[in-house]
Amino acid sequence: MDIEAERLIEGEQCEESPKHWRKSSGLLVVAAGLVGLAGVACAMSLRKTPAAHMGLDALVGKDDVVEIAPSDAACSTWKENCMETGCCKVTGHKCFVKTPNVMAMCNKTCTPGLKGFDCGIVSAPTMPVVKPAGQTSLYCIAVLTVNTGNPKPSTEKDLLTLQNKYKASIFGCEGKTVFSDEVVDLGEGYSTVQVVDTYNEFHEVKRAETGSWVNWAMFFQVWWKVREMGVWHDHDWTIKVDPDAVFLPARMRTWLSGRADTEHGVYFENCRDVQMGFFGNTEVMSNKGTSVLTANLEDCHVAYAPCADSGCDWKWGPWGEDVFAQRCMDRHHVEKVQAWDETTDGACKSDRPEGERDNKKWSAPDCSVVKTAAIHPFKKPEDYFKCLGQITGETYELL
C-alpha cells in the first residue's frame, strides 16, 4: 500500500512532519502575475506520467519553454483541493487527481486506484524562453560575516582565504566578489568589499539556537552592493555560495548548460519536502532574475523589513537571508524552478541518506561519489579541503 497516498486520503499529515517545514501563510502579497499562473495551471490538461518521472528540472523543452512552480502563496496545502491552484506548498509534492476537473490533493506520492485516485497530475505551468540555453558565464559571490554575534570563533575567513589561494569555489568563476561587514584581507592581493549597515538593522536580533545575528538585513545590503557594482550584468548567472559549501564552478556550468532564462527571470529552489525550499548554501538565479531582485530591493524592504526580525507570518521566527530573497523574487514574479540535483546539502533533510535523516550535522562522508555542483556543509578547513581533494585528487596544504 502507498502510505503517502493513504495519509493523503485520510487527511493525515504527510511523512515529513511540519516541524521540518519552512512555513508561511497567505499574508504574503500574491503578485498578479503569479495568481495568473495558478489559473493557467488549473486549466491545463492532466498528465498520467508516473510521479517518479515528474521532477521539474528547468530543461528547455521541444517547444522552448521552461517548466516552473508558482509561488508558495499561490499554492495549496496538503489539506486543500489543489485542482484550482495546480501546485503544492510542500516543495516536490504533486497535485494528484481524484475526480477529473473536480478534486485533486497534494502529496509526495500516489497509488492509482487507492481511495478512488487515478493519480493523474495537474500539469505544471510553463514560461517561454527568451534567452536560449547554453550560456553559462558565472558571477559568484560569498559573504564573510565578521561580527556574527556568536562568541564561538568563525571559520569563514580561513575558508575563504584558502579558497582564494587555490582558486577554488567562487574564485573559479568568471566574475567573483566576497562581501563583508568589514574590509578583510584574504591574501593574494584580494580584500573583501564592505557593506554598510545603512538602516542600523544588522544587530537587532539573535537566533536563540546559535546566538548569531539574524542575517537578512546584512544580505539586503549585499544585494544592494551587487546592484551598485553591476558586475552581474556581464554574466548569465548569479550564484551566492556559502563559505562552507564545496562549490565546483565547472560542474555548475555543465548543470546550467541545458537551462534557459525567461522574461521574468528564474531562480532554482533546491530543497524538497519543505515549504519555501530556496536554501542558502547555493543560491542560483539567472541574469534577468538578478535584475528583478536587485531592482526591487527598496520595495521588498518596505514590505518585509518591519517584521522580518519577528518572522512576520513565518512560523519559525526571524527570516534568514534566503527567505528574504525568495520572497522578494516571488513578489516580483521571478519564475521559481524546482531543481533537486543542484546541491547536496546536509541542512536539507531530504538530501540526507536513509538512517541519517534526523542527523542535522550530517555531511557527505565521501565527496568522490557526490555528483552535484555543490556539497554542504564543511565548516572546518581540514574537512572542506579533504572533501575537495576527494573530488579533484589533489592535496591541499592548510594555513
Image (cartoon, grey):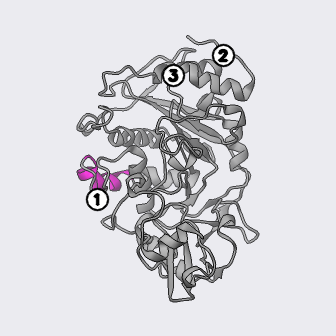
Q: How crowded is the residue under tag 2: few (<14 C-alpha within 10 Å), some, or many (20+)?
A: few
What residue sits right under mark 1 in the picture? 313
Left or right side of 207 for 140: right
Q: How crowded is the residue under tag 3: few (<14 C-alpha within 10 Å), some, or many (20+)?
A: some
Instruction: Identify the residue at horizontal 50%, vertical 35% (top origin).
Output: 242
Q: SS of the residue at dot 3?
A: loop
Q: SS of the residue at dot 1?
A: loop
Q: Which residues are magenta?
A: 297-309
Mark 1: amino acid: Asp
Residue 242 among magenta residues? no
Q: Is residue 36 visible?
A: no
What residue sits right under mark 2 in the picture? 396
Q: Is residue 315 above or below residue 165?
A: below
- Mark 2 or mark 1, which has the lower sequence index? 1
Q: Is residue 231 above or below residue 273?
A: above
Q: Is residue 393 visible?
A: yes
> Where does residue 295 sit, x and y in percent of width and height?
43, 53
Question: Mark 3 or 2, which is nearer the eye?
Answer: 3
What residue sits right under mark 3 in the picture? 380
Q: Pointers 3 and 2 in contact (CB under 8 A)?
A: no
- Mark 1 or mark 3, which has the lower sequence index? 1
Give the spatial CA distance, label 2 vs label 1: 45 Å
Instruction: Identify the residue at horizontal 36%, vertical 28% (top origin).
Output: 181
Figure quadrant of residue 267:
bottom right
